[in-house]
Image (cartoon, grey):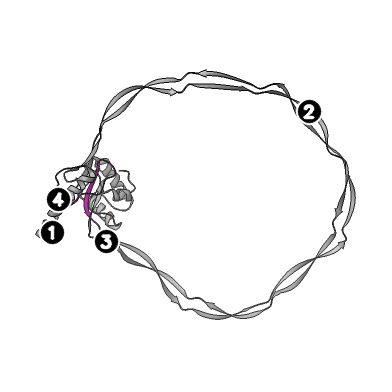
Amino acid sequence: MTKLSTYIKTLAVGAAFFSMQASFGQVDNLPFNDLPPQPTQYGECYAKCKIPDQFETTDVQVLVKEQSSKTVTTPARYETVTEQVLVKEASTKLVPVPAEYETISDQVLVQEAQVKTREIPPKYKTVQEKVLVSAGYGKWTRKKKAPQCFSQNPEDCYVMCWEEVPAKYRTETRRVVVEEGRTETNEIPAKYKTVSKRVVRTPATVKEVTIPAEYKTISKKVVVEPARTETVVVPAEYKSVSEKRLVRQGGYTRWVQILCEKDTNSGVIRQVQRALKDRGYEPGPIDGILGSQTRNALEKYQGDNGLPIGNLNTETLRSLNLNY
């Protein structure tokens, strides 16, 4: 870092400190030039890392064969069609229809409906509730360099944690209504009995029935499309080839969320080692130790996948499908 850039960043840190203090709460004295983004919850840690170049592969259509034409003769096309020929004319006849009966039921009142009421008194209970004495707040706290930082230069990875100062409460007791007093009404429905009787639903009639005409089907062969000669265009042929192009220029430093020191344990390291091994990156023994072989495998995976390089950041853990 040049003396000029150091001087400019020293001037900027004061303004950044007071503006972040207004929006985030309490901030400790910081020797560096900016703060991480607004945290979503207490206990988050952030570090600065290098972002690699990011590429994508796209498919491009390449001409293999030019468009051409050819003459094609299409023979005549025939099909067999059928026709209906009348054999016997339609006619009618009269058919007697007998009467239809049904059994119907009537409801007869046996006892009138009644209404009964009763008074139910209210119910109470004693409850305790917490009353806020002083509200909680958050503050930025600088931690020592995280053990998962790969760089030997302590200024390469800045770690900040947003920590909670909890609120204070006192307990108060009071009597509250659990259930309001009310008047309960019970309705006793009327009672009925069913009386059945048989009645004519449809009287006897005579109906006219139509006897449909009779037909027979005959088949014959007809020309559907005459023979023809035509020129057919043979379309050009293409093939797809892959090209690699730069999507995002790397080399920029930004804040990324990382595992805090308290959350970085041998169990997490083992999960990372297993996930790297499953994806074809050799981390060495699955021993829960972030050794040189595991670091090299992790850096290669991060570089191959366009991830922040140099620490156990949450973007890499999500890419490995790990819970953190």
Q: Residue at x 34, y 47 (%)?
A: 321
Q: Secondary structure at mark 4?
A: helix
User: Left or right of 306: which side holds 59?
Assistant: right
Most common SS among magenta residues: loop
State how far apart marks 3 and 1 are (Cα): 24 Å
Q: Residue at x 30, y 24 (%)?
A: 172
Residue 133 falls in image quadrant: top left
Residue under pointer 4: 14
Tell me which segment is drawn in magenta: 32-53
Q: Residue at x 14, y 44 (%)?
A: 29
Residue under pointer 1: 5
Among the two numbered marks 1 and 2 on one chain, the one whose residue lies closer to the N terminus: 1
Q: Residue 108: x, y in percent?
A: 74, 25
> Which label belongs to residue 53?
3
* Marks 1 & 4, CB-CB < 8 Å contact: no
Q: Secondary structure at mark 3?
A: loop
Amino acid identity at mark 3? Asp
Residue under pointer 2: 196
User: Left or right of 107: which side holds 20?
Assistant: left
State how far apart marks 1 and 4 are (Cα): 15 Å
State how far apart marks 2 and 3 are (Cα): 90 Å
Looking at the rendered structure, the number of numbered marks drawn on it comes to: 4
Among the two numbered marks 1 and 4 on one chain, the one whose residue lies closer to the N terminus: 1
164 to 229, vertically: above or below: above
Amino acid identity at mark 4? Gly
Quarter of the image that includes the N terminus:
bottom left
Q: Residues within 10 Å of mark 2 (few under 14, many from 20)?
A: few
